Image (cartoon, grey):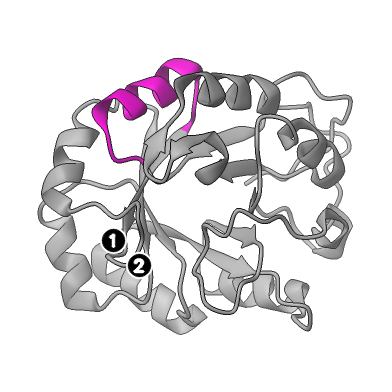
């Protein structure tokens, strides 16, 4: 269903892979809507629950704290959530719709699912499956055979679904290879509800660049000529 009659709204921005207080503060000061923390030990941006508890203490109301998980077990997830208060869970592994639904019900948390844009994937069907399971949104990322996100590469934005591909609005998030230089163009092409960036605003893995964050958020939120948006 088209949202062409809906008023334009600013694209939401999530800065992910945060490991330092100064970077959390930079993201918030720049106007990010969400900050993300990676609970996946193999990642160079991985953090512990104890560390994130400190980082979240710098997150004000109305900015969401998002936890990124890859094939996490129920007990491990519950243990992490007993130490840190997250607003949203982001499942970035091979979790099925049923597994995501179960983890969401177990923890009482809203969740989104990241999908890698594999060449042979029926993206509309995959999105519908997770939507029907209770996802608050779906994040579309570049595909890599060995990495669960953080590839630094973009996929063909022409593959990004359009509102008319679905019978009701649903929040789709764009990720993969986004930078301050290309995010405005990416939004113009996809009309994404939100964008998610990590490596594109880093000085090195896990270490953010304050000026890059500021430029990225400003470019993502600049007025768009398109009024049509994905909305809840």
Q: Are marks 2 and 1 in contact (CB under 8 Å)?
A: yes
The crowding category of the residue bearing disc 1, from other C-alpha atoms within 10 Å (few below 14, some 14 to 19, many at least 20), is few
Q: Which residue is mark 1?
A: 108
Q: Quadrant of residue 123?
A: bottom right
What residue do we see at 25% from left, 64% from top? 107
Point out the stretch of residues depicted in magenta: 18-33
Residue 221: say if magenta: no
Q: Residue furthest front?
A: 204
What residue do we see at 16% from left, 76% from top? 75
Q: Which residue is mark 2?
A: 104
- Classified by dominant secondary structure, the portion drawn in magenta counts as helix
Looking at the image, which is closer to me, 47 or 72? 47
Q: Quadrant of residue 79?
A: bottom left
Residue 31: say if magenta: yes
Location of residue 81 in the rendering, given as x and y in whole percent from the top left corner: 18, 57
Q: Secondary structure at mark 2?
A: helix
What's the distance in space between the residues labelled 2 and 1, CA to CA?
6 Å
Position of 98 compared to 187: left or right? left
Q: Secondary structure at mark 1?
A: loop
């Amino acid at each position: 269903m088209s949202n062409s009659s809906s008023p334009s709204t600013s694209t939401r921005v999530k800065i992910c892979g945060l490991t330092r207080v100064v970077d959390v503060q930079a993201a918030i000061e720049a106007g990010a809507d969400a900050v993300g923390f990676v609970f996946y030990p193999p990642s160079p941006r991985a953090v512990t629950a104890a560390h994130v508890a400190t980082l979240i203490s710098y997150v004000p109301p109305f900015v969401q704290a998002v936890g990124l998980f890859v094939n996490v077990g129920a007990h491990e997830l519950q243990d992490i959530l007993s130490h840190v208060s997250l607003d949203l869970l982001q499942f970035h592994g091979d979790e099925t719709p049923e597994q995501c639904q179960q983890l969401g019900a177990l923890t009482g948390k809203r969740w989104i699912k990241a999908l890698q844009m594999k060449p042979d994937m029926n993206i509309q069907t995959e999105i519908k499956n997770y939507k029907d399971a209770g996802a608050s949104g779906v994040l579309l990322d570049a595909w890599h055979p060995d990495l669960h996100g953080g590839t630094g590469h973009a996929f063909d934005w022409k593959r990004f679904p359009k509102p008319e591909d679905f019978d009701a609005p649903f929040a789709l998030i764009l990720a993969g290879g986004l930078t301050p230089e290309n995010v405005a163009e990416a939004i113009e092409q996809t009309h994404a509800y939100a964008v998610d960036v990590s490596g594109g605003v880093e000085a090195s893995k896990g270490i953010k660049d304050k000026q890059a964050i500021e430029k990225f958020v400003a470019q993502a939120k600049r007025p768009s000529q398109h009024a049509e948006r994905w909305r809840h």
